[in-house]
Image (cartoon, coloured by chain):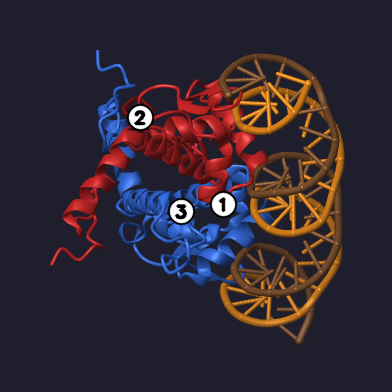
Chain colours: A red, B blue, C orange, D brown
Amino acid sequence: MRLSTKGRYAVTAMLDLAINGKNGPVTLAEISENQGISLSYLEQLFAALRSKELVRGVRGPGGGYYLGKSADEISIANIICAVDEWVEFTRCGGRQNCSGGARCLTHTLWDDLSSEIFNFLANISLGDLVRRNIGKKEEEEKPLSVVANEDTQAA
Amino acid sequence: MRLSTKGRYAVTAMLDLAINGKNGPVTLAEISENQGISLSYLEQLFAALRSKELVRGVRGPGGGYYLGKSADEISIANIICAVDEWVEFTRCGGRQNCSGGARCLTHTLWDDLSSEIFNFLANISLGDLVRRNIGKKEEEEKPLSVVANEDTQAA
DNA sequence: TGATTACCAAGTGATTTACTAGGAATTGAC
DNA sequence: GTCAATTCCTAGTAAATCACTTGGTAATCA
């Protein structure tokens, strides 16, 4: 798993699309304006998102982008993996010669942790995020939390 | 939150330290050998880890590194933040002029998601990782999972 | 036909990555 | 006190990545 600012841009743009794309396509120019991301960089990100069928483009005047599937079917992990290029965590893909020592042990641990992070992000959809925010706006103060967070003072 | 290969190196090295540091300090040369990371790069990573008091160095022959606190008191988020430099998620820190539009909405959503990812990693300690792996080795096949993962075929 | 949009390719300065080189400071062993 | 082992420190570097610019082409609507 890799989580860089590039992934952040992609998630941000997809959120904008999910929020503003309810009636008709959204142009990259609008997203660029809304989110302060350069148009051409958005084009590159959306080329990757399109290749994974997370968005669908419509050319010509009145065109723009739709989500490729429903917001509930698109996970944060989907988006990040589309633009951020899945990286191999360990050089030894299990089959290598780092046999049984401390090296492979830590590799295993890191792989397990990576899977957890991935699953965590795979279980949050675009739709979840948007809905939770709507709910939060109505209730004005309820923090969203999937995992227990003792940081937020629950007083 | 930022999760790059640099953070991976740091977590890997700290895992190695947690596993091998039970009796006496571990030298960077050993970790370098074990994990296939260059000595000088490790030195840089450990300079950052030391500044956050996650490790403690002992010079001279027989020296090396200890964990700065118990493995249970060191979270994955601690490690990643130490080497990966916390980045500001949104340019508008809430107080800027991106007033109320779609822009600040998506920024809020992204901030909330970032908090969730951070809390998730803050709730996993080095000790957790090591213990879970020991448990797995004894039971030989039980996958570790905090969240439900439908990927692992539970047949 | 012309404007508007997605699509595509090449290049670029700045930053980051992972590393090399060359030391200095501290400490244990002899 | 000398020597070796180790941390600690600074500088530099090739390669990759980031976010962006430029300059187009292709499709589509009015």
Closest to the camera, between mark 3 and mark 2, is 2
The front one of A114 and B45 is A114
Residue at the far left in the pictured view:
A155
Q: Residue at x 62, y 42 (%)?
A: B36
Mark 1 to mark 2: distance in Å?
Answer: 23 Å
Residue of label 3: B1
Note whether B54 is above or below A78 in the view shown: below
Please check whether the numbered discs 1 and 2 fall on a single chain. yes
Q: Which chain's residue wears label 2?
A: A
Task: Please say if A15 is above or below A70.
Answer: below
Q: Quadrant of residue D13?
A: bottom right
The three-letter code of the residue at mark 1 reads Gly
Q: CA distance from mark 3 to mark 2?
A: 23 Å
Instruction: Compare residues A122 and B121 and report the one nearer the observer.
Output: A122
Q: Secondary structure at mark 1?
A: loop
Residue at 36% in and 56% down: B75
Query: In the drawing, does residue D8 fall left or right of residue A128?
Result: right
Q: Secondary structure at mark 3?
A: loop
Mark 1 crowdedness (10 Å alpha carbons): few <14, some 14-19, many ≥20: few
Camera-side mark, 1 or 3: 1
- Mark closest to the chain's N terminus, 1 or 2: 1
Q: Pick whichever, B149 or A14, lies toward us.
A: A14
Q: Is residue A150 left or right of residue A39?
A: left
Q: Is residue A141 above or below residue A61?
A: below
Q: Where is mark 2, residue-wise?
A: A71
Q: Position of residue C17 (x, y in %)?
A: 65, 49
- The dot on residue A36 is 1
Q: CA distance from mark 1 to mark 3?
A: 20 Å
Q: Position of residue B46 (x, y in %)?
A: 56, 62
Given the image, on which type of amino acid does mark 3 rest? Met
